[in-house]
Image: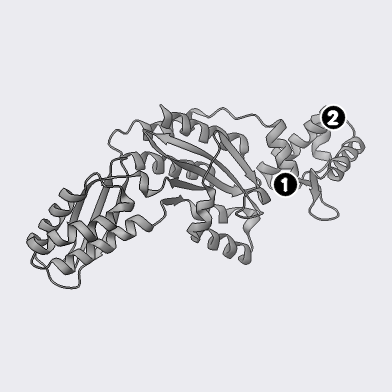
Amino acid sequence: MLTKRQEQLLKIIVEDYIKMVKPVSSKAICDILNCSSATVRNEMSELEELGLLEKTHISSGRVPSEQGYRYYVDNLMKPKELSGEDVLKLQKIFQNNSLALDNYIVKSMEIISEMTNLTAVVLGKSSKENCVEKIEVIPLNDNNLIAILVTDKGHVEHRQVTINEKVSIDDIKQTVDLINKMIIGTPIDEVSEKLEFEVKPVIARYVKQHEVLYNAFYNAFCDFTNSPNVVMKGTKNILMQPEFDNTDKIREILSKFEDKTLVNKIEEEDSGINIYIGSETDFDDDVTIIKTKYNLQGEEGTIALIGPKRLEYDRVISLLDYIKKNFER
């Protein structure tokens, strides 16, 4: 159990290090605590023995350890009141009635990523919980088009479809019309099977170049179904942090961001806002992940922010809480 002065000292060191990214010396703390340098050094040594502080090298001041950050988050930190500027930036998203549900989520996290210089991750629920509402096609040229899929939850996906033979616009339109009539209301993960056994025979009867068109759309739907619903914003933000200034660490972090199966582990099971520091993350020992579940008009998923262990916990928690509450309204 820490004394009141030790808790005050730890709080000062954590918050000063978060701002300055420099080891904190006893001299910098004496005036704040109104005690001698020797007293501060003794208290710092005791906190170091308890595993809450550590030295970067022999002559340096102290920096928080992973355990020190955890004690700070659990016992000393209070959520920070958001500034009017922060609230205004986010309200611009929530007051934009032209956005689809997915865009509310992604745009909100994109803004938070810019505000905090952290990496934002949005994990939607699996495709089986989305049913097809409509399919649209936008021709690009003779061989390429964009297929757009919209679900009943407001989820929008698009893929470029390449057709290796020249086909008529009428055949493309008729194929899309038939698909729309037959698969509306079908769960995404059942679409491929329905296309193969129900839609394919019908297209064969009505569309001249049915085989090439069917194969193109079938492949696009398989891609919709199998791709993880993961959106990342500000991936490079984390690499701008002083903690990740060596090439090996940058390469390691980037490879983890590119591994979608690893990113999917970020999905949150608990309610509330949860903080995982260093080794607690199952992602990387040098990062912190702050995440929460969201529910936006029945669309559920996880939103998370990833950064160094040295981040503004009080502000990030307040931002995620603000987003979560606005979604639920």
Q: Which residue is rendered at x = 60% and y = 54% of the image? A: 283
Expressed as whole percent of the image width and height from the top left, the position of residue 302 reads 48, 42
How many circles with numbers are drawn on the protein?
A: 2
Q: Is residue 323 left or right of residue 45?
A: left
Determine the residue located farthest toward the bottom in the rendered image: 165
Q: Tag 2: Cα neighbours inside 10 Å, few (<14), some, or many (≥20)?
A: few
Q: Tag 1: Cα neighbours inside 10 Å, few (<14), some, or many (≥20)?
A: many
Expressed as whole percent of the image width and height from the top left, the position of residue 247 reads 61, 66
Quadrant of the image containing the N terminus: top right
The residue wearing badge 2 is 3
In the rendered structure, which amino acid carries the disc numbered 1? Glu
- Residue 216 vs 173, above or below: the answer is below
In the rendered structure, which amino acid carries the disc numbered 2? Thr
Q: Which mark is residue 66?
A: 1
What separation in Å lies between label 1 and label 2 (alpha carbons)? Answer: 20 Å
Nearest the eye: 19 or 178:
178
